[in-house]
Image (cartoon, rainbow, N blue to C red):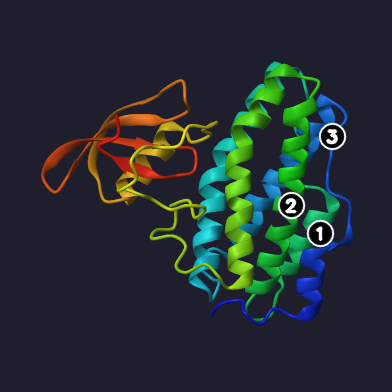
Amino acid sequence: MKFHLLSAALCTAVGLGFAHPALSAETAQDFVNKAAEGGIFEVESSKIVQGKAKDQDANDFAQKMITDHGPANAKLQSIAGEQKLQVPAETDAKHKSDLEALKSSNGSADQSYVKMQQEAHADAVKLFQDYAADGDNADLKAFAQQTLPTLKMHKEMIEKIASGKTDNMATTSTAPAATGTDQNASAPVPGANSFTEAQAKSRIQDAGFANVSGLTKDDQGIWRGTAEKDGKQVAVALDFKGNVVAGAQ
């Protein structure tokens, strides 16, 4: 099932950003509050629908939210702790209401989940983008800059799912859908890379490589290492978009 038949009201809401102001943060504590509440919601809502959604792309997206946002939420908590800032242990009242709606949904919750994730990622991209540019705390500002590319990927993924234009956007549940993997590309794309070493290894393995080893992230934000493919050892690289490039130098 794809989402070609989203109601006109939903399409209008998407176009208008759901008729509510995008999030912004004026202080470090404000940023931590909003980022943590949003991150918790994205994980918890995904746990509710993961494996239950009728649309496979929605299931894949839910798994990706759990995989990607868990480490990001933990990193935010660590940085906030170092800065003596308080981190919310649960999401806000509005998102709690959304979670309850998902839990009590009769039948498929696919469309509700997709709509919620569109709204959440529009807010998250705005929040992180603004703080990355004008944040008042250097460590949190760096965190926002590093995390923003992944949030933009997520936003593009969920918008494609909503429009029904995924074209099997991911070959696995953890492969980034903004560009997928490209083993024929001439070179990986430099950029701020928020993938952890474990996530980078997983994505390279998902692209069909075995025995991934020696992964290090260079000064261009590219994870590089070696792996086996068709019985041969090759150099591999993973860029911030999620592209896996074989034979990259």
Nearer the N terminus, badge 3 or badge 1?
1
Q: Residue 105: name its quadrant.
A: bottom right
- 10 Å crowding of disc 3: few (<14), some (14-19), many (20+): many
Q: Which residue is mark 1?
A: 17
**Taking 71 as reference, is 199 left or right?**
left
What residue do we see at 84% from left, 48% from top?
A: 22
Q: Which residue is mark 3?
A: 25
Label 1: element kind: helix
Label 1, label 2: how far apart the Cα atoms are: 7 Å
Q: Which residue is mark 2?
A: 122
Q: Is residue 152 above or below residue 235?
A: below
**Taking 155 as reference, is 218 left or right?**
left
Q: Is residue 39 above or below residue 164?
A: above
- 10 Å crowding of disc 1: few (<14), some (14-19), many (20+): some
**Residue type marked 3:** Ala
Judged from this view, the residue extending furthest toward the left is: 231
Q: Position of residue 170 (x, y in %)?
A: 44, 60
Q: Are marks 3 and 1 in contact (CB under 8 Å)?
A: no
Nearer the N terminus, badge 3 or badge 2?
3
**Residue type marked 2:** Ala
Q: Position of residue 65 (x, y in %)?
A: 57, 51
What residue do we see at 74% from left, 52% from top?
A: 122
Q: Position of residue 131 (x, y in %)?
A: 77, 31
- 10 Å crowding of disc 2: few (<14), some (14-19), many (20+): many
Question: Mark 3, mark 1: which one is toward the viewer?
Answer: 1
